[in-house]
Structures are given as structure tokens and as C-alpha cells.
Image: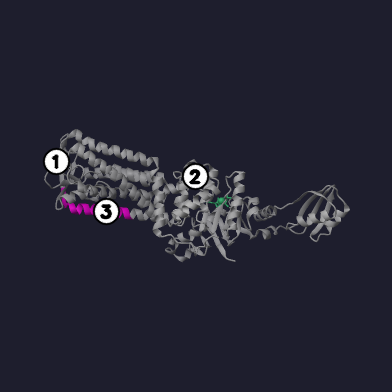
Amino acid sequence: MTATNQERPRPSWFTRFWAVVRYEMLWNIRKKKFIAIVIAAFVLVTVDLALPAFFNVSKNPAFAATFSVGNLVFFLIALVTVMNSISGEFESGTIVPLLTKPVSRTMVFLAKVFAAFVIILVTYTVLFIYSTVGGIVVYGPQDNLQLVPLALLGNVISTFVWVAIILAIGSISKSSLFAALGGLVLFIAFVFAGSIIASVSNEAGALNYVPGVGATGVLNVAQRSQNITIQNITVSMNSVSTGTDNIGTNLVNYARYPSATVNITRTDVFSTPPKVIQLYTESIGFIVLRSIAVAFAYILVFLFVAWFAFKRAQIFE
Amino acid sequence: MELVIETNNLTKRYGSLTAVNKLNLKVQRGSIHGFLGPNGAGKTTTIKIIVGLLRPDEGTVKVLGHELHGGKNEGFLQSFREHADSRLGIGYMPELPKFPKHLKGSELLDIYGRMYGMTEQQRKEQIPKLIEMVGLTGRENDLIGKYSKGMQQRIGIAQALLNNPELVILDEPSLGLDPVGMVEVRELVKNIAREGVTVFVSSHLLFEVEQVCTDVTIINRGTALASDTLQNVSGLLTGPAMIHVEVTQMSQNIIKAVKSLPFVSNVVQTGNTLVIQVTTHENVRAQVSQAITRAGGIIVDMSQKTSNLEDVFLQLVSKDQEGKPQ
Ligand SMILES: Nc1ncnc2c1ncn2[C@@H]1O[C@H](COP(=O)(O)OP(=O)(O)OP(=O)(O)O)[C@@H](O)[C@H]1O
Ligand SMILES: [Mg+2]
């Protein structure tokens, strides 16, 4: 005899949530695209490790602690992890059997976000172990290794800005192609807008409020290592950027120099020789706090949009 | 009798097209309820509303005692209510189901089982049993992406029975199955119904519905044309039914004996064959054969046109279609 609903045990919220997380993990990890991008990320980290060494092979004990996988990797990892995590279910029709199980849409959505978090965290942990070991090999013994997890955490937050944006586009359009292209267009637009504003306008402060690199400046502390000079432009090793992409690096800067200030500058590339113009000064603590707040604002807003669209979606597929 | 599915004036529009029109569907607990209608009648749309994939434009749905969706005038926040618990007792097989290609058949059932809150022990017992029941033994560890259409259909049936549901909803379960598979599905439906499970099955195959269902709803253009027990719906057919009998040696005795049966209205003889017109749509072949044997006849062939449902269906649908452009 079959059990009726009254006598049927009700599984806990967490049991069902965890089942969806497993579901999400399994098919994400088996995606060929994902494997390809992890390999690509390794290549980029390798280049990151090796390239500066060609210009300046001096010791840099701070390499590991200030390492960041970089904004392109943030975007690409976010893209392959979530570009079809909602829209792909619609496109393939797998949403139909999934949503007719005793799991709520909110549960499914949160499980997908959580799975993305875990996948990104694990991927970055492996990359950071690689960069730390690589840093020791290329740049000699490293200091502040206890700050590496802080840098990693910052990188995950930076990536999640893109995760939220791509999820929102995918959830509204129900199309992985839209999610990928839309995300790419925004990414390129922000990168271009950033570099244009940074070189022609004094309003670099506006960049603090869009996802990306933000404004650039110089950290007012004793020289951390030798400057690099390429074609008359001296790149200070104390250079910092203030945007959501640099939360990891700035968290580490803050941990190392809690009371340091940053002179925000822009480089006027149209004057010869290119001239560095001083704009304003902020404390590193404020910069890191603001970038985290901006990142979380984007993450929350776009995740809410994605959740809302998913929750209201009718399944015509 | 308790109803497991009850819709009230259910209406669903796709733009200007009304796919489901003021449908009142009632499915009794313990029945095998056939949902019959031509292509585009609104079967899948109705089922998708019942399982919560679509929101109705008007009307209400009650499944296993849970009021779904909440009418439009219940307010915006109310429409956000989720009904995950109501699905604990439901098994649903979508029309042409699609499952994640990257999962193996057994993994899929395992993960879905976890969503139902099944323990490891329960999953270990239930999953191999289901895989065997749907004939996928030996292929359960292949990726679903490598399954044929019929195999996907079979894993679809398996996942609909995973949680020992009290209500199983099957949307065209035999679509894409080979003839053996179709027979298997019919047997399977009968077997699960024997255990007290209510089965709601959509189909456009009349013989399928006729062979397994106890109740039937005929739908066309989103409206129910008939909804009752199979017997009563078959009885809607107007006009007499016919029985054909062939004997080795015809005699006046035989004809007289047949004519004297209470339900026989007319008998026409051609050689060794009798065409008997009867006033009932019930199966009376046993009585006819008894009468002929007693009169000394030896029957070599006898047939009663049992596919009355087909006649009812064609009659109702063509009447409904009359004068209206499709
Ligand atoms: N997503 C959709 N958008 C627009 N119209 C749709 C959509 N889905 C179904 N329809 C229309 O609604 C009507 C009912 O379709 P439905 O799929 O419910 O029929 P059905 O009875 O299941 O048919 P079949 O036997 O072919 O499966 C049809 O006219 C169909 O064209
Ligand atoms: Mg259909």
C-alpha cells in the first residue's frame, strides 16, 4: 500500500537543498567547457608568474600574498560556471523534471549559487596553491603567507560580481548565449570605459562604483620592491587599483599597512612624456571597505533580479 | 469518493489562443484516469498547471488536498507561495522528458531520490528495482546523453515512480516506445494501480486508454466533452452495437435461440454468419455463445466491436468541431 501525504515523512529543507547542490556540482564538473577554462586559468597564472620575471628577476617576497588571478580570469571563471546554470536548464528542458520534484525554486536557486561558490572557491584554492609555490620558485622565499587566504577570499568576491550579473541575464533571457554575450559586452564596456576615463578625465572616482578595476593610485608606504621602467613609464610596485576586481590585493594591503593612504592618480598619455597627475588621497581601509560594499551591492541586486525572474518564470519548454 | 485532482474553471491562454477553457477536471482516488484528446487539445497544458510549471489565467487547482497557485485576485505576494511539499506524493513523467546528459541513469535516480528525502537504504532498494521494471538493466551506468529516445522515456517512467507516489501523472508515456514497450507500460500502469496508486495518464491513443483506464475525460480545444467512468462514456454512444458470429452449421434453432435473448433487437443471417444487433454496450458475448451452443451450434468465430470509445471519441470531437474553423 502506498503512503498518503499525511503519513509521508517531510524531508528537511536542508536535505532537499543539499540534493540540488549535488545535482548542480555533478553536471558542472563534467562540463568540458569548465575543464577547459580551468586549464586556461592555469596557463594564465603561469604567464603571470613567468612574465614579470623576464623584465625584472629581482626577489619579490610579497608576490604570493599580493597575487590575484586577474580580472579576465574572474570573468571567464564566472562565465563558464554559471552561464548555463539557470538558462541551460530551460534550454535543455531539464528544468521540467527538476522543478516538479519536491524542491522549491528558491531552494534550487540558492543551491545553484552555493554550488557556483564552492566550485569557484575550490578552483581558486588550487590556483593559489600553485601561485604560492610558483612564487617561491620564481621570486624566492615569501613573506606574509598567512595573508594568502585573505587574497583568495577577495578574488572569490570579485568573481561573484560577475557570477551575479551573468546569472541575472541568463535567468531573464533563459538563454545561455545571451548570458555569455551580455556578460562579455558588459565586461569589455567596463574595461574600456575604465581605461578611457582613467586617461582623459579627472573623474576617476566614478570608477569606484562600477564593477572592474576602479581608479589607480600609489600606496604611501616604503618602497616594497624595485620599480619597473618600460619605455620611460615607471610602474611603481606600490601601485594599487581601487575597484571590485582588487578586493583581494587591497585586503592584503590593508592587513599589512592598516593606516596607509593612497594617492589616486591618472596618467595623461597625451602629453609627452606621459605625465602622472595627482587627483586625491584616500585611506586604504576606506578603499577596501568601499570596494567590498560596492561588490556586495552588485552581487545582492543582481542575485535578487535572477531569483525573481526564476521564481516567476513559467515553464513553457 | 475522495478527489486527488480537482480543477475549477481552469483557463490558460497563450496570447490570443485559449489552450484550456474553463476545465473542470475531477480525478478520483484509486482510479486510472485517462485524459484523452487530439493533438493540441490542451492535455499537456492542463498537466503542466497541475504540477505547477504553468500559472493558470483563471480558475483553481487542488492536488492531493493542496490548493495550488492561488487565484489571480489573491494578490501578488500570495502568488509567490511555493508548493514543494504537495509534490512529495506525486510522480510526474513529462511529455518527452529531458534529463541532464552528463548524469548516468542511476545517478539521476539517486539525486532525485535525495530530493524526495529518501534514505540511502530506501534508494538502494528502490532504484535497482525500478531500473529493472523499466527494462534498463545493464544500461543504468551509461550517461543519459547516450540513451535512445525510448530509453529516455523509460528512465522518465522510473523517476516518476521513485517516491512510491500516491498520484502518478504520465503525459503520453508510450510516445516513442516500441510495441513491446507500449505493452509493458500498460502492464506497469495496471500493476501500480493495483497497489492503490491513482494514475492520471494523457494519451491520444484510444486503445491504450480503453485497455487500462477505469475513468476517462475527453478533451478538445481545452474543454471537457465527457468525463465519467469508461463504461459510462462508452455508453454515450448512440445507436446499437453489433456482434458477428460464425458457426460451422447454421440452423433455424440457433437463430430462434439468439432472437429470444432479451437484449437482442435484430438478427441478420448470411450463410453461416449471423450479425446480431444488441441494445447494450456491455459485453454480452458469453450469453450469446451459451445460447448458440445450447441450440446445437458450434462457434468458429465471434467478435463484438469493443472499441466503442473510438466511436464516442470521433462522434464527440467531430460534433464539437462542426462549423468551427480549427
Ligand atoms: N508554449 C506555447 N506557446 C504558445 N502556444 C502553445 C504553447 N504550448 C502549447 N501551445 C498551444 O496550446 C494548445 C494546447 O497544447 P497542448 O500541448 O496542451 O496540447 P496537447 O493536448 O498536449 O497535444 P499533444 O497531443 O500534441 O501533445 C495548442 O494549440 C498549442 O499550439
Ligand atoms: Mg501533449
Chain under numbered label 2: B
Percent from the top left, x then y, of residue B237? 71, 57
- Asked if both marks, 1 and 2, belong to the same chain, the answer given is no
Circle 1 — which element?
loop
Circle 2 Cα neighbour tier, 10 Å, few/some/many (<14 / 14–19 / ≥20): many
Furthest toward the right, the residue is B252
Amino acid found under the numbered disc labelled 1: Ser
Image quadrant in which the N terminus of chain B is located: bottom right
Q: Nearer the viewer, residue B33 or B193?
A: B193
| Residue plotted at (44% across, 51% down) | B111
- The label on residue A294 is 3
For the magenta stretch, what is the residue range?
A279-300
B57 to the left or right of B187: left
Circle 3 — which element?
helix
| Residue under pointer 1 | A225
* Closer to the eye: label 2 or 3: 2
| Residue under pointer 2 | B140
Could you tell me what secondary structure mostly forms the magenta stretch? helix
Q: How many marks?
A: 3
Q: Are marks 3 and 1 in contact (CB under 8 Å)?
A: no
Amino acid found under the numbered disc labelled 2: Glu
Q: Are marks 1 and 2 in contact (CB under 8 Å)?
A: no
Q: Earlier in the sequence, mark 3 or mark 1?
A: 1
Amino acid found under the numbered disc labelled 3: Val
